[in-house]
Amino acid sequence: MNRWIYYGVANGIGVLFGTIFLIISLKKYKNSSYNEKLKPLKFLYVLFILLEILKIFYHITYNQSLSPKVLSFAFCSNFLYVYPIICHTKENSMASRICKVIAVVPSLVIGTLYLFLIPKTYNLSTFSFVLNLHSRLYHITMLTGAIYMIVVKLCNFKFKDFYFSAISVCAYFIFCTVMSMALNTNIANYGPSSKQLGFLYNKVGYVVGNIFVCFVVFVIAMVIYGAIYIIKKHYNNKYSKKND
Amino acid sequence: MIDVLCLFLIVIFVPIIVLVGIKIYNPNSYKKLLVAFAITMLGIELLRFFVNASFYESAIVPSNDLKLSFVTFLCVIVFFGIFNKSKFGETCKNIFILTSLNPIIVALFNSKVYLSPFDNYGLIKALYFLECGFVVLLAILFVLDKKEEIKPLQMLYSIIFVLGYAVVNFMANYFWKTDIKFNWLWFLQMSVLIISTTFVYLIYYLLRKWLLKDKTNKVKNIDE
């Protein structure tokens, strides 16, 4: 089987789900109150907690054991923990602000990477395909949730808030690093044996490599907030010209 | 070579990131920031000592791997610079500013300051590099917070401070019988540490002259 077909099917299912979710939720909740807008996010996090539980049981059934790598302690698992906090705290509380940026900023980058980066090698077994499908569905839905939050203005993007969001994401990233080191694995963050960032960690060391990733987070946050600011400004200028 | 590059990148980016935050949030005074970063630097130094000690059994810190460095001395005098309002405190502040590049120079001459054979994750290396970044950041914040300029006499006090460090370094390495050789390289390192205080003072003097000239030109243009 061609790898484009293999990953295309997995990506396609993720994109289809994301598109249907966005169309329905934006049509119904775009101009609703704050609490009404949270309903699609509640649906998402309940759905994915169920999917994570199914994945863990599938692993145990197939392998007759449970590896720590299967548990939801990875950096991308923040979706499962921050969405409930967003949905069940007050709108302008510090916890809600921090969780919104942790949910949105990494999702935009990682979700986009998952859509467009197709690995060169893959495993044709059913077990591998099911896990790959779960991973693609999960990460593309992260992206969908982030886009939904931006469009319905659940997360405000003033340019100077990039600093606050970069610090929040870095703090979460450092927490994942400390957990990886304490558990002596790279389950929470990429480690020296990973394909994605292994080259960096093997050259400069694990902790120094993570410091550089934090610097990159600042730059990415500045770029994302800057791009959204420019798009909003262009859209507002166009709208005010039409009114004139 | 890679380690040297990492050191320079961290020393450059840490102050830039914090100064961008200061520009965005515009605090009224730098005192709270100075206290926060000084405590952070002390915490990192303590963590560096304990992590290094944890690599050896029986919780006994081996004398020749104590990782005692120039930055340890700076961690002490920074608090005098922040909390002591007398001339002594002012002198400590100036010494800290003028010797802020010295931890980097020590790391360039002697990589054992941040390397350990048991440090699999590179944690001690990362902590030392972060400390160098915090030292430069604190020096910049001290300069921004200062009302009086640094007089040339302060260079003499900085040189005495560096000589004091040289004596302690010599005694520690001699009595603990480390494998540091007191050859031309060691004397060159101490000489460069002394020369760097002059270099930092020169940069401070030229930048201050240029910024003040810029300010007076703007005032003249407004008056006209």
Image: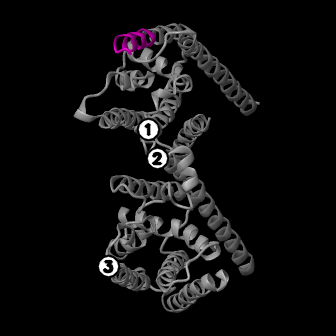
Q: Earlier in the sequence, mark 3 or mark 2?
A: 3
Residue drawn at (37%, 26%) of the image: B65
CB under 8 Å between discs 1 and 2? yes
Question: Which colouring convention does the figure follow?
Answer: one colour
- Disc 3 secondary structure class: loop
Q: Percent x, y for residue A71?
A: 35, 71
- Disc 1 secondary structure class: helix
Residue drawn at (39%, 23%) of the image: B68
Quadrant assignment, res A197: bottom right
Residue drawn at (48%, 30%) of the image: B135
Q: Percent x, y for residue A202?
A: 54, 49
The circle on residue A64 is 3
Near-viewer residue (B124 or B154): B124
The amino acid pointed to by label 2 is Val
Near-viewer residue (B140 or A50): A50
- Label 1 to label 2: alpha-carbon separation: 9 Å
Name the subunit of mark 2: A
Q: Which residue is mark 1?
A: B127
Q: Residues within 10 Å of mark 1 (few under 14, many from 20)?
A: some
